Image: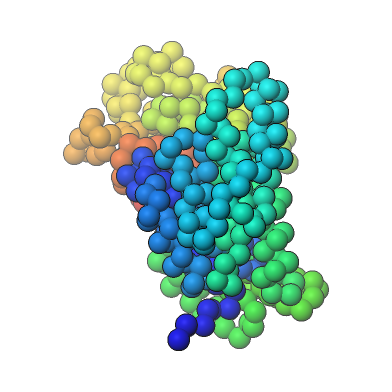
């Protein structure tokens, strides 16, 4: 007897030896899950398989018997190790057929780019018979969709930018029509910094009890944590009200660590707060090596706020910035006094601006008993005064730099919101 399928169960299968070897990290599965979650569909299983045609066939047959929908990525390219289309045809007893329109489009794309199309690119236009082609606006390999064993199998290229476009334009609308619950679905993501995932879970446990149609997902994304609230209701008004109530209840528990929602990142919020107060910013970075400036300048319009960035990495560079050598000799380059002097000198370069500085030991060497690896001092100078604070960050060099840049931005954000910088606490101190 065949076991009944779970209602609207969805699986994701990523294909490629490079995934199993660790040469490439699979980001496609998480992207697919996020896109489907936004329409109320949940992925129940994820898996990866190499380029062996036999293994792909076995995985496709097994998944089609378990799930109502399977999304497959990878293996649709022009090379000999791209075997997904052939495996799909074998798995479900179909022939490969040439899709003339896809071949024409591939030829036109090469011609428009002024590139030679080698004969093996034609392989991308061969798909299993009785399949529906899914257009690829960003690349050469079309996707395709077929049905077998009461399952919708969707095959997409593994290139993330191509995959995302095809998900948005073709796959999500199709699955929304065929599988998504006929309810109004809304979601909101709370972005938190300065609190560990385990503590978040402890604090919010039971907070949403009694709210029907509400689910909560923990989405850690180093160095911050995120909570995604999803609500399902009969109408938009009811869903909006339910979402607002769920957010209110969560903020009662963890509000002090929530810095933004949805796409709001730390650097965007800092720049918005600076603009609101008509303030300018000048940076003096040592151990972070310009990372704070890099993050801020990723935001359009950052030039309205960010005026200068000095990467004063060496001792001599700090002296050139204006830090007194006697101060360095007395306290060391990694010290509260030098952090404050760096922030003050940076602020003085643009009268009336706020100065923000970092100096520390990112490791893996260079530490001492008094100043161990991971020690970072952050300095802040404004017209109201000058402050500094000592932090100790764990992990490798990259982790220390990332955390130092994030704490510095969050420290500045909290100062702009009227909090006392000297009362700032994070779990990595």
Depth check: give the residue in front, 429 or 74: 74
- Above or below — where is 364 with respect to 244? above
Quadrant containing the N terminus in the rendered view: bottom left
Q: Quadrant of residue 276?
A: top right
Query: In this view of the protein, can residue 103 be seen by the observer?
Result: yes
The residue drawn where x is 66% and y is 70% is 179
- Above or below — where is 51 with respect to 243? above
Place of residue 344 in the rendered image (x, y in percent of width and height, measured from the top left): 51, 27
Query: In this view of the protein, can residue 258 be seen by the observer?
Result: no
Left or right: where 421 falls relative to 154:
left
Left or right: where 197 falls relative to 192:
left
Depth check: give the residue in front, 275 or 5: 5
Depth check: give the residue in front, 171 or 415: 171
Place of residue 48 in the rendered image (x, y in percent of width and height, measured from the top left): 41, 55
The residue drawn where x is 64% and y is 83% is 212
The residue drawn where x is 47% and y is 83% is 3
Depth check: give the residue in front, 321 or 259: 259
Place of residue 381 in the rendered image (x, y in percent of width and height, measured from the top left): 53, 33
The residue drawn where x is 72% and y is 59% is 173
Q: Quadrant of residue 71?
A: bottom right
Place of residue 235 in the rendered image (x, y in percent of width and height, measured from the top left): 79, 75
- Above or below — where is 397 with respect to 95? above
């Amino acid at each position: 007897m065949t076991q009944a399928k779970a209602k609207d169960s969805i699986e994701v299968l990523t294909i490629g030896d490079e995934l199993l070897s660790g040469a490439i990290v699979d980001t496609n599965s998480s992207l697919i899950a996020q896109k489907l979650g936004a329409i109320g569909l949940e992925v129940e299983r994820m898996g990866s398989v190499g380029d062996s045609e036999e293994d792909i066939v076995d995985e496709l047959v097994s998944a089609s018997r378990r799930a109502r929908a399977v999304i497959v990525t990878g293996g649709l390219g022009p090379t000999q190790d791209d075997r997904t289309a052939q495996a799909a045809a074998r798995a479900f007893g179909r022939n490969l057929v040439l899709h003339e329109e896809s071949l024409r489009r591939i030829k036109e794309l090469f011609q428009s780019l002024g590139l030679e199309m080698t004969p093996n690119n034609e392989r991308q236009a061969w798909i299993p018979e009785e399949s529906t082609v899914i257009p690829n606006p960003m690349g050469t390999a079309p996707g395709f969709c077929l049905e077998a064993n009461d399952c919708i199998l969707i095959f997409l290229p593994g290139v993330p930018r191509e995959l995302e476009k095809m998900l948005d334009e073709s796959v999500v609308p199709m699955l929304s029509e065929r599988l998504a619950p006929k309810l109004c679905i809304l979601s909101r993501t709370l972005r938190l910094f300065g609190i560990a995932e385990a503590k978040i879970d402890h604090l919010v446990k039971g907070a949403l009890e009694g709210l029907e149609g509400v689910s909560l997902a923990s989405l850690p994304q180093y160095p911050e944590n995120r909570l995604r609230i999803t609500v399902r209701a009969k109408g938009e008004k009811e869903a909006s009200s339910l979402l607002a109530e769920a957010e209110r209840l969560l903020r009662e528990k963890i509000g002090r660590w929530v810095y933004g929602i949805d796409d709001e990142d730390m650097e965007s919020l800092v720049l918005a707060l600076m603009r609101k107060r008509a303030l300018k910013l000048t940076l003096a970075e040592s151990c972070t090596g310009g990372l704070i400036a890099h993050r801020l300048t990723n935001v359009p319009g950052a030039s309205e706020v960010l005026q200068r960035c000095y990467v004063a990495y060496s001792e001599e560079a700090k002296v050139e910035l204006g830090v007194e050598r006697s101060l360095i000799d007395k306290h060391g380059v990694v010290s509260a006094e030098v952090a404050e002097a760096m922030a003050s000198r940076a602020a003085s370069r643009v009268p009336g601006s706020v100065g923000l500085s970092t100096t520390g030991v990112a490791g893996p060497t260079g530490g001492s008993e008094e100043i161990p690896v991971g020690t970072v001092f952050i300095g802040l100078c404004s017209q109201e005064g000058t402050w500094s604070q000592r932090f100790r960050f764990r992990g490798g060099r990259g982790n220390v730099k990332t955390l130092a840049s994030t704490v510095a931005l969050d420290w500045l954000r909290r100062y702009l919101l009227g909090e006392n910088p000297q009362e700032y606490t994070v779990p990595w101190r």
